[in-house]
Amino acid sequence: MAPRTLTGYGPTVSPVRRCSRTACSQPAVFTLTYVYADSTAVLGPLATYAEPHCYDLCAEHAERLTAPRGWEVVRLPTDGAPPSTDDLEALANAVREAARPAPGGGEPVGQGVEVGRRGHLRVLRSAQPQRDR
């Protein structure tokens, strides 16, 4: 069976980033960046986005990585653990808090007085509260 195509232009593209080494089809798990000013090669966890000046490497190629003579290889610690439930709960609470209306309530929708218009934009002034007589 032939691979499915997207709009008939060729095979689908895998969402998994692959190792940058030629002929390696393993999934990338590390990102290699060169700091030319310091003659340093930095190997760390897989970057969130693929960058043109970085190289994604599989575990095997990252382990066998060597740098040119006179260069230093810095291997950043990689914590392969997913975010803890405390981290996820704190993020969810922050999102809930941001979605809450401000205390004291804001101006009710539709209670402004139009004082100007330019195209589809309107300038509104708050309506004076009606006082009971």
Image (cartoon, helix red, strand yellow):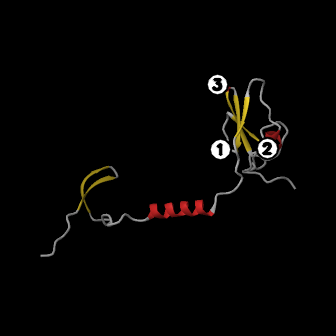
At x 73%, y 26%, the residue is 71
Locate residue 101: give its quadrant. Answer: bottom left
The picture places residue 63, in percent across and down from the top left corner, at 81, 40
The span from disc 2 to disc 1 (Cα, nearest Å) is: 16 Å
Looking at the rendered image, the disc whose residue lies closer to the viewer, 3 or 2, is 3
**Do the CB atoms of the residues marked 3 and 1 lie less than 8 Å apart?**
no
Relative to 81, 104 lies left or right: left
Query: Which part of the image, by quadrant, shows the C terminus?
Result: bottom left
Mark 3: give few (<14), some (14-19) or many (20+) Cα within 10 Å: few
Front one among 45 and 70 = 70
- Mark 1 belongs to which amino acid? Tyr
Badge number at residue 37: 3
Q: Nearer the viewer, mark 3 or mark 1?
A: 3
Q: Which kind of residue does numbered mark 2 sit on? A: Cys
| Quarter of the picture holding the N terminus | bottom right
The residue that disc 2 covers is 58
